[in-house]
Amino acid sequence: MADFLRRTPMLWLFLPQVIIILISHYTGSPLRLYKDTDISFPDSMQTYRAVLHDYPKERRKTMLYTAEVLPDRHKVLLYLLKDSSRILPSYLDTIWVKTTWKQPEKIGAFDYAAYLRREGIAATGYANSRHWQTQGKADTTLFSFERLRHRLIRRLETRLTDREAGTVAAMTLGYKHNMDYDLRQSFQRSGAAHVLAVSGLHTGLIYTVLIWLLTLGGLYPPLYDERWRQVVQGAVIIAGLAFYAALTGFSPSVCRAAVMFSLAQIAIMVRRQPFSFNTLFAAAFLILCFRPRDLFSVSFQLSFAAVAGILALEPVLSRLLPITTPGIRLKKTLSYIRSLFTVSLAAQISTLPISLYYFSQTSNIFLLTNIVVLPLVSLLVMFTFAYFLLYYIPYIGDITATVLGKLTDTLNSYVTYMEHLPHAFTEAVLTLPQMIALYVIIIFFIWILRRTTQNSIR
């Protein structure tokens, strides 16, 4: 443990940062993490001008919008009552709305108001069809990643079913609002929910494709001898990862992955170890510098816990399962299957306390699920981006869409089938102290296991 602390200097920057953020969260000082949501709106109904910053999400009786109230640009949630006699506003519309902005209350044990504050939402409002009027479109001359993302989602919806398009949009563009709720439950209970969060798997594929293109399909080595070529290649890869992170809405998981791969690219250029705990803590440190509220995001916590578990536990599990089979091809195949097993197990163990604390359930069949799901998702992501590129090409675009639809339908059917197996998932409730205690046990277990395997090798 002492050796680990000496070899991980970024930890000593990350821990004080976390302590300051926690103090700020619970005391309101020295930083005001939620100053942009501490807004006092009038208690009476008033007329406001707002810009809609997302396409509507359909509810049973209303349409939900994310909006900004002008001129101060406070972020709010706006519910408009459905009315068949009126055309509802859409993305980037500017509207006049008469409503009362309110802070939401708790839903049972769930503090909905605190959740919205962490998401930067200042208040929620409701209006019927008589209390809003569309004024026109906001300025659409500038490039918008949100607009591009929705344009790509529309491309998916033109040739895929709603169920398939919802799954693909969630996995590749980070847009989960169109995904069927029961299907999301199936992913959660079968142990495949992590593929719905755009993270290391998806960003890693983007990174691999960029390396492949910049090396002309592997014809040249990844890093050239000439320093200027190294700089150009590194800059292109980092810019490509930043573009993809912006396209997916800068979610905590994809930000972590993009920053980690960018730091890894820099480490390769200066002949250092690309993926390590230092890289992980550096990524967390940089993200929290700009978005300290992400520390309380479930996505942020799950993402970093999973990667930390993989870095700490996966090498140990691989050493416990040596492959001594002769034959290069068979050995590579078995090594790939072993990596699916060890990575899934390491990530599941390291995220188990968080999953039980927030969701009160965990999958018992995640290993069986991920052996099939991970290869399927890799193919699906690659075919999705191929579909976006080939969309306007006659016949080829249709063929790509057909293959993409079949892959997505197979994935959805498989996770649904796995969910309904006997004892597929376990429900349990953890309190915060119990979650912390479980992490202490897991860390101690990993430490003992690492020492044991290292001693056996010696």
Image (spheres, grey):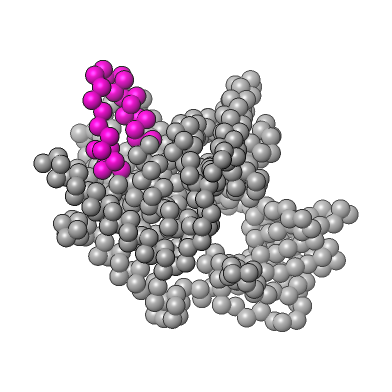
Name the image quarter holding residue 432. Answer: bottom left
Which region of the structure is painted magenta? 314-340
Position of the N terminus by quadrant = bottom left
- For the point 79% across and 58% down, the residue is 61
Task: State the image coordinates of residue 315 (x, y, percent, origin top left).
Answer: 26, 42
- For the point 38% across and 50% down, the residue is 349
Examine the rendered structure and indicate whether residue 326 appears above or below residue 186: above
Examine the rendered structure and indicate whether residue 116 appears above or below residue 42: above
Name the image quarter holding residue 287. Answer: bottom left
Magenta: main secondary structure equals helix
Position of the C terminus by quadrant = top left
Task: State the image coordinates of residue 355 (x, y, percent, origin top left).
Answer: 48, 55
- For the point 45% across and 62% down, the residue is 294
User: Quick check: is 332 in the magenta stretch?
Assistant: yes
User: Quick check: is 322 in the magenta stretch?
Assistant: yes
Is residue 454 toward the left or the right of residue 101 in the image? Answer: left
- For the point 24% across and 48% down, the residue is 449
Is residue 160 toward the left or the right of residue 291 in the image? Answer: right
Q: Nearer the viewer, residue 187 or 254?
A: 187
Outermost residue toward the left in this view: 458
Examine the rendered structure and indicate whether residue 236 appears above or below residue 34: above
Is residue 292 toward the left or the right of residue 159 in the image? Answer: left
User: Can residue 30 be seen at all in this image of the molecule?
Assistant: yes
Q: Nearer the viewer, residue 219 or 40?
A: 40
User: Can residue 240 be seen at all in this image of the molecule?
Assistant: no
Outermost residue toward the right in this view: 85
Task: State the image coordinates of residue 29 (x, y, percent, origin top left).
Answer: 41, 81
Task: State the image coordinates of residue 380 (x, y, percent, origin top left).
Answer: 52, 32
